[in-house]
Structure formats: C-alpha cells, structure tokens
Image: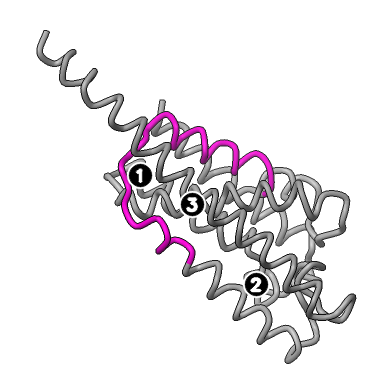
Amino acid sequence: MIKLLRMAVFLLVLSAEVYLVVTLGEKFRPADHFSFFTVLSNVFAAVVALLGVFSPVSPQIRGAAVLYMATTGIVYWLLLQGIDVQTPAYANWVLHTVVPILVVVEWLLAPEKTRRWWIWLSFPLAYLTYTLVRGPIVGWYPYPFLDPRQNGYGDVLLTCVFVAAVFGVLAFAVSWAGTKLAQKRSPSMSHNQGQ
C-alpha cells in the first residue's frame, strides 16, 4: 500500500511535469520553471518517493519532503488560488493539491521519528534569497507575493514573515506527528510480534 502510494506520487509529478512542458511548448523556460518552489518541492518529493519504493529513505529527508509539499499546498490555497501562476490546469491541480495531500497521507501512514526539524527551514530560506537576488537581475519573479515591483519590499517582507511562520509551525507539526505516531506504532508492533 505504502509503496503504491509512493509510486503514485512519482508518476503523478512526472505526468504533470511532462504535461506542463508539452503544453507550454516554446513558452517553456527551464530556468524560470525550476525557479518555482512548487516545482522544486514536487520534484524533490517525487525522487524521495521513488527511492522509498526500493529502499528505506532517511526520516529527515522524508520529513523535509512532507514539509515542503504541505507548505506548497497551503500557501497555494491561501495566497495563490485564483491567480495565474502560468501553470496549465492539470499540472496546477496535481502539483498544488493532489500530490501535497498524498505526501502528507503517506507520512501519516508510515510515520518516522525525526530530530532537528529546524534544519528543514534552510532550503526555503536559501530559495527566498535566490528568488529575491535573481528577480531584479532577470526582471521576473515566480510568485506575485515575492515581487516588490507591485507594492514594495514592505509587502514582500510581511508576506515572507507569514510564510516563514507557516513553515515553522508545519515543520514542528510534521516532526511531532511523525515521532508521536511512530512511537504509538512501535509498542503495538512489538506486541504483535510477541504473540
């Protein structure tokens, strides 16, 4: 069941990415495409899921994938729904809604103990730095809420603080839920093995 779920995550992301590239055609810009947090988090989650089909993956790496996908889904529904994010409908639905839900469900069904959840926050921070440095150079930002040309850096800062808070709360929640559920499972599993 878990392996099927992981394979489904990988195949869904692959299908959405292929669909996106084919649909956009000549409009597809690899450098811009891979500057979307959504794309990076989905590709990362897909690779982690595929590896997990064949061999155990570090709980820290799995937890990071869950955090990035949960945040992708929540930020999309809170800040981006109804905004044109240059993503065809099928890919948009899969990458922002379906896969984030499946990755969280997979974590809850196969939870693991994790430590030092705050390390997971280094990637979003690096991504934010990259986006704000690259934006003025190329004159393009992946998300409206990161574009200071609209309402200035003050608005960008406020939104970033909000998203950072979401990341922090979710990182703690992913780690806490994984650890608690894993602890609940281990006594019952050892009890069943003893019978």
**Amino acid type indicated by mark 1:** Gly
Q: Which residue is mark 1?
A: 52
- Quick check: marks 2 and 3 in contact, CB under 8 Å? no
- Circle 2 is placed at which residue position? 35
| Image quadrant in which you'd find residue 47 | bottom left
Question: Image height check: is 69 above or below 86?
Answer: above
Instruction: Give the alpha-carbon distance from disc 1 to disc 3, as whole Å.
Output: 21 Å
Amino acid under label 2?
A: Ser
Residue 95 in the figure: left or right of residue 84: left
What residue sits 72% from the left and 75% below the top?
29
Using the numbered discs, state the Cα–Cα distance from disc 1 to disc 2 in whole angstroms. Answer: 26 Å
**Amino acid found under the numbered disc labelled 3:** Ala
Q: Residue furthest top?
A: 195
**Percent coordinates x, y for residue 115 in the rendering:** 31, 52
- SS state under label 1: helix
- Magenta span: predominant SS is helix
Q: Circle 2 sits in a helix, a strand or a loop, which is it? A: loop
Give the residue drawn at x 72%, y 49%. 91
